[in-house]
Image (spheres, rainbow, N blue to C red):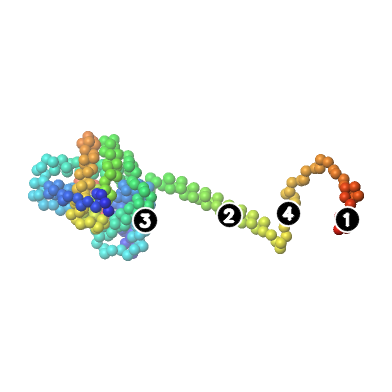
Amino acid sequence: MTGPEATAPEPVAEPYAVVEAFLDGEAVDPHSLRHALAEPAVRDHLVDLLVLREGVRAITPGSWSSSRAATGGSRLRWLAAAAAVLVALSAGYYTGQRTVVASEPRGGETIVAVESMPAPPRPTQVIRLERGVNWTDGPTGK
Amino acid sequence: MVADVDILFTAHRDGVFRYLSRIVGQGDASELTQEVFLRVARGPLPPAEPGARRAWIFSIARNLALNHVRDDRRRGVAVELAERPAAATQELSAALAEALDRLASLDRDVFLMREASGLSYDEIAAACELTLDAVRSRLHRARLQLRASLERPIRSSSVPTVRLYDRTRSDGS
């Protein structure tokens, strides 16, 4: 650890220690408190710390439950988004399962859904091939 | 055991939440507060002295906050006002939020445990593993630093009233 974390702070001067302990609800010697409060600088310190305390109150939430109520709207939005994602994932998974089952090969056969295939294009010209003209049979039969 | 945890949760959740909210921000503090008490529920409770238990709960909260900041590199949002403060305290509140972030983290922890959560010096010492003198010194140093940083808003703010204690924020110990 380096920097201010590791630095041991200076001991607190007596009048300030007393007045801060009083401020924090710790037990203090009344004679020491009277003595400390006799110093104007210490009185100023006390009043400034009280003002500071009001500032801290203003920037810290009152309670955990009110914070939850305040953030409840955004939480609901997150829950709704999470639910939507879950539904989408489930639907995708279900659809995927059905597709896999339908397209699984059965006994090595390839199933072609003929109804769904597009019609072939019509021929634009016809070429007729004649035996003896375009080809002759050889010893191998072609 | 469950009843004990329930009592501890009711008694200390607000103090833990206020402390955490200045370190990790209010949204994450809400989640971390629950995590603190989940850990409390999982582990064996320390001896039943209220102060000891509160210090123990805050030591868990502090460790979780340190991990949170370390892991996510998230510091408390510089200017995050929990409630809409009165206009008189707005400048002070904004400056204070920034000044708190500039404190050494241990000094800030000690200050927030005292000012935001109301822990005693003994409890802070136990929670932060410090001696009583070290708690006094760090608290004093944090206050001096904040007072120096905020001299103008402190003196110019027209905070309507000041008080030693806030009875609406007592944490049941």
Q: What element carries label 3?
A: helix
Mark 4 → mark 2, Cα distance in angstroms: 24 Å
What residue would you read off at disc 3? Answer: B35
What residue would you read off at disc 4? Answer: A112
Q: Nearer the viewer, mark 1 or mark 4?
A: 1
What residue would you read off at disc 2? Answer: A93
Q: From where the camera sits, is residue B69 visible?
A: yes
Which amino acid type is marked by label 3? Glu
Mark 3 → mark 2, Cα distance in angstroms: 33 Å
Which amino acid type is marked by label 4? Val
Mark 3 surroundings: few (<14), some (14-19) or many (≥20) residues within 10 A: some
Percent across and percent down for residue B70 are 35, 52
Mark 1 → mark 4, Cα distance in angstroms: 38 Å
- Total marks in image: 4
Disc nearer the start of the sequence (1/4) = 4
Which amino acid type is marked by label 1? Gly
Front residue of this view, candidates A119 and B21: A119
Q: Is residue A96 left or right of residue B161?
A: right
Asked if marks 1 and 3 touch (Cβ < 8 Å), the reply is no
Percent across and percent down for residue B161 are 22, 40
What residue would you read off at disc 1? Answer: A138
The residue drawn where x is 74% and y is 46% is A118
Q: What element carries label 1?
A: loop
Q: What element carries label 4?
A: loop
Q: What element carries label 2?
A: helix
